[in-house]
Image: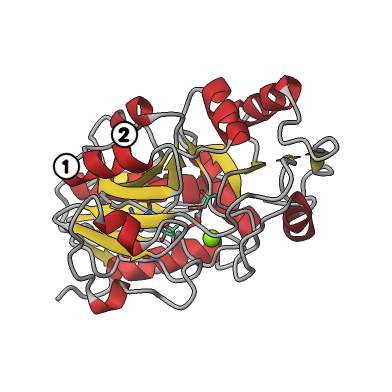
Amino acid sequence: MTAQAATQVIEAGEGAIAPGAAAVERAAHTLAAGGLVAFPTETVYGLGADATNGAAVARLYDAKGRPSFNPLIAHVADADAARALAHFPPGAKRLASAFWPGPLTLVLPKLAQCRVAELATAGLDTIAVRVPSHPLARAILLAFGRPVVAPSANRSGHVSPTTAQHVLADLRGRIELIVDGGPTPMGLESTIVACLDRPVLLRPGALTRADIEREVALAEAPPSVASPANVDEVPIAPGALASHYAPRARLRLDAQRVEAHEALLAFGPTPAAGAERAAAVLNLSRHGDLIEAAANLFSHLRALDASGATAIAVMPVPRAGLGEAINDRLERAAAPRL
Ligand code: TXA
Ligand code: MG
């Protein structure tokens, strides 16, 4: 995303928590228009985007300057809304009823009818879901009525923001709106528990291991997912969880021409030579727009994989801006399998 018009801040009144109904309405309206809205949760400030809008999600990664598409947490108003996104195994049900609303994120099997954009879940078959307890976050989620993906509202590599001033310092001019609810009560990110096979603690956070273990027995996390030093930069789990996205078809990167039996993932106005004999063709962005390309990346890869082609030729994608993250994901998807 290129710099936006000035970021607006809706300020908290004298020590007040809620800037009021007008702020909530504006936040919901901005999200519906594909805008980026920072808002307080009980843990840290989140940078929200409409989870069902792939282009808005792509702008969010761009605003944060994330070098790769780390999957995002979908925030919803209540457990009913969460059940529209994911399957809840018994352990997850217990954890949700004990700790929601609150600082618990559950990584769960994604439902086929889940409307969250593929880019937000980085093409995984799992989804991270959380019901925050902060009254402003809840009010915005209720008013908006759709899931909101929200990573911590900092530039990639910086620490999570616990005040609106922190958000402004990192993201001024890159997002549309900051709703200032004063300092966040907990100041530490949510605890993440994956409930796929057996419950596994993926990220220590505002709830302790003991809190979680009062409800469910935790399995040992594989070494590669245990407490990464910088949880914001290291995609937790994707490499270690069985659900890591990898197309069945082989990917051939930086392809200049299409070979027989290949599908083509194109980029830009001019398809690669031989495109007419491709088994299937999809274009990440005819206009060469990296935000559009990011929004289409995972869904196009899946669709080409489903076409039955045994290989997918991928045209070169520039490395500028979001192109770095797009290339990161393409390289991972192309890496040899074990
Ligand atoms: O407290 C919080 O959780 C804050 C507030 C804003 O809700 N959000 C937050 O988001 O900390 P973020 O994006 O900074 O961290 C989310 C972590 C990332 O490390 C990501 O890799 C992991 O959750 N994650 C998301 N979806 C995942 C999935 N399907 N499988 C494994 N890890 C996942
Ligand atoms: Mg973060």
Q: What is the x, y in percent for residue 63? A: 65, 54
Query: What amino acid is found at the position of numbered circle 2 in the picture?
Result: Leu
Task: Kindly report the distance in space between the C-alpha atoms of the residues bearing marks 2 and 1.
Answer: 13 Å
Q: Nearer the viewer, residue 57 or 335?
A: 57
Note whether residue 330 is visible. yes
Q: Is residue 81 above or below residue 124?
A: above
Pick the residue in front: 57 or 275: 57
| Occupied quadrant, residue 323 | bottom right
Drawn side of residue 26 relative to residue 5, left or right:
left
Which mark, by number, is residue 334? none
Quadrant of image for the C terminus = bottom left
Horizontal and vertical percent for residue 163? 72, 53
Q: Nearer the viewer, residue 286 or 87?
A: 87
Relative vertical location of residue 225 with respect to residue 83 in this rendering, above or below? below
Quadrant assignment for ligand 1: bottom left
Residue at the spot of label 2: 85
Tag 1's secondary structure?
loop
Q: Secondary structure at mark 2?
A: loop
Q: Is 233 displayed left or right of 304 in the figure?
A: right
What percent of the width, then of the height, locates residue 46? 59, 48
- Looking at the image, which residue is at 71% across and 25% down? 26
* Image coords of residue 147 (percent x, y): 46, 33
Residue receiving disc 1: 89
Instruction: Check the image and tell me how it is coloured.
Output: secondary structure
Which mark is in front, 2 or 1?
A: 1
Horizontally, residue 80 falls left or right of residue 16, namely left
Determine the residue positioned at 24% across, 50% down: 215
Q: Residue at x 28, y 69 (%)?
A: 239
- Amino acid marked by disc 1: Pro
Looking at the picture, tell me which residue is in the foreground, 147 or 261.
Answer: 147
